[in-house]
């Protein structure tokens, strides 16, 4: 997802770009790895301003993802809404210290992002934001009972006798246990 700086007006612009998640390599990897499925394209709304060679971008990202519940594996849906704010420059400004000497600061240290050949690539920024907001432990419901560890039945919709069976075995053992008098 790229922006041509020459096409950005000084007065600013609002752009809306829609792109399938498979266009983002990190998101495509998630789908291929079975981590989640993107149900809708990634919609990016950008507020772009150009101020004397610097480009300021305020972006909002929205998409919808289906991700298995950590306990019962049922597919659960999540809306992802992220925002980011980044300033891009094609060359780093000169910064001088208190004694007037020129300081060498990296773009990251100045909170800036460099772009080259008049083209700003926001692909990485967007996929990082989506990755950050993917839930680590998604649950279909806070009360999800999960799957039975013995027989694998989904305890939200069915019952099994594994827990009872265990208890009755314990009682059987106890019954034969004679206390020496
Ligand atoms: Zn669940
Ligand atoms: Zn069971």
Image: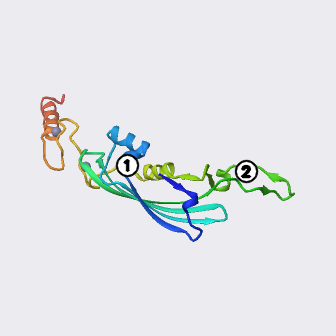
Q: Position of residue 126 (x, y in %)?
A: 47, 52
- Inter-mark Cα distance, 1 to 2: 35 Å
- The residue labelled by disc 1 is 21
Total marks placed? 2
Residue 151: mark: none
Q: Which residue matches tag 2?
A: 105
- With 107 as the anchor, is 130 left or right in this view? left
Q: In which quarter of the image is ligand 2?
A: top left
The 10 Å Cα crowd at callout 2, few under 14, some 14 to 19, many 20 or more, is: few
Place of residue 79 in the rendered image (x, y in percent of width and height, measured from the top left): 34, 58
User: Where, quadrant-wise, is the C terminus in this rendering?
Assistant: top left
Task: Tell me: 94 left or right of 144.
Answer: right
Considering the numbered disc 1 on the image, is that residue within a helix, a strand or a loop?
Answer: helix
Q: Which of marks 1 and 2 is nearer the N terminus?
A: 1
Residue lying at 39% horizontally and 51% vertically, measured from the top left: 134
Outermost residue on the right side: it is: 99
The part of the image, by quadrant, that contains residue 100 is bottom right
Does the residue at mark 1 contact the one at mark 2 (Cβ under 8 Å)?
Answer: no
Residue projecting furthest to the front: 6
Q: Where does the image place residue 154, in percent across and percent down from the top left?
A: 18, 44
Q: Residue at 15% of width from left, 30% of height from top?
A: 173
Query: Considering the numbered disc 2 on the image, is that residue within a helix, a strand or a loop?
Result: loop
Few, some or many C-alpha atoms within 10 Å of disc 1 (few <14, some 14-19, many ≥20)? many
**Can see residue 86?**
no
């Amino acid at each position: 997802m790229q922006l041509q700086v020459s096409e950005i007006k000084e007065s600013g612009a609002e752009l809306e770009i829609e792109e399938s998640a498979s266009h983002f390599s990190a998101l495509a990897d998630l789908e291929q790895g079975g981590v989640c499925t993107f149900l809708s394209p990634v919609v990016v709304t950008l507020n772009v301003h150009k101020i004397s060679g610097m480009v300021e971008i305020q972006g909002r990202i929205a998409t919808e993802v289906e991700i298995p519940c950590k306990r019962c594996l049922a597919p659960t849906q999540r809306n992802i809404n992220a925002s980011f704010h980044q300033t891009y420059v094609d060359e780093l400004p000169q910064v001088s210290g208190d004694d007037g000497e020129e300081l060498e600061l990296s773009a990251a240290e100045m909170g800036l992002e460099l772009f080259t050949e008049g083209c700003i690539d926001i692909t990485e920024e967007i996929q990082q934001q989506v990755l950050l907001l993917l839930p680590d432990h998604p649950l279909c419901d806070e009360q999800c009972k999960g799957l039975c560890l013995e027989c694998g039945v989904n305890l939200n919709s069915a019952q099994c006798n594994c827990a009872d069976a265990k208890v009755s075995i314990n009682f059987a053992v106890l019954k034969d246990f004679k206390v020496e008098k």
